[in-house]
């Protein structure tokens, strides 16, 4: 299981989201930390200079994260048009 760490901005963005979506996002993050292979159809790598990051789609929200050894670092949680998300 991965240890999950949020950047301050990601944590504040999560708090600003509707509580129903907060719970859905938290469930997906827990599921991601336990077994990322369960969500493989929702995870995609980013391209270009952000190629070390991955993106998890939860409804219209995008969770940008980075996997390191046993640590899952959540960078951004954002609801935006895909041209503005990255």
Image (tube, rainbow, N blue to C red):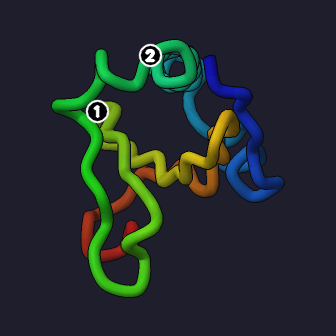
Query: Looking at the image, which residue is at 28% across and 33% down?
Result: 59
Q: CA distance from mark 1 to mark 2?
A: 20 Å
Q: Dot 2 lies on which element?
A: loop
Percent position of residue 78, x then y: 49, 53
Residue 54 lies in what quarter of the image? bottom left
Q: Dot 1 lies on which element?
A: loop
Residue 59 circle label: 1
Q: Does the residue at mark 1 contact the one at mark 2 (Cβ under 8 Å)?
A: no
Q: Quadrant of the C terminus?
A: bottom left
Residue 35 circle label: 2
Camera-side residue: 18 or 33?
Answer: 33
Number of residues whose C-alpha sits closer than 10 Å to that of mark 2, classed few (under 14), some (14–19) or many (20 or more): few
Query: Looking at the image, which residue is at 76% across and 40% down?
Result: 5
Percent position of residue 50, x then y: 42, 76
Q: Quadrant of the N terminus?
A: top right
Percent position of residue 68, x then y: 62, 48
**Residue extending farthest bottom:** 49
Q: Is residue 36 above or below residue 63?
A: above
């Amino acid at each position: 299981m991965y240890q999950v760490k949020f950047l301050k901005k990601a944590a504040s963005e999560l708090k600003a989201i509707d509580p129903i979506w907060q719970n859905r996002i938290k469930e997906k993050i827990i599921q991601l930390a336990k077994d990322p292979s369960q969500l493989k159809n929702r995870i995609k790598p980013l391209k270009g200079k952000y190629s070390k990051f991955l993106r998890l789609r939860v409804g219209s929200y995008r969770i940008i994260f980075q996997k390191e050894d046993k640590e899952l670092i959540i960078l951004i949680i954002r609801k935006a048009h895909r041209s503005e998300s990255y």
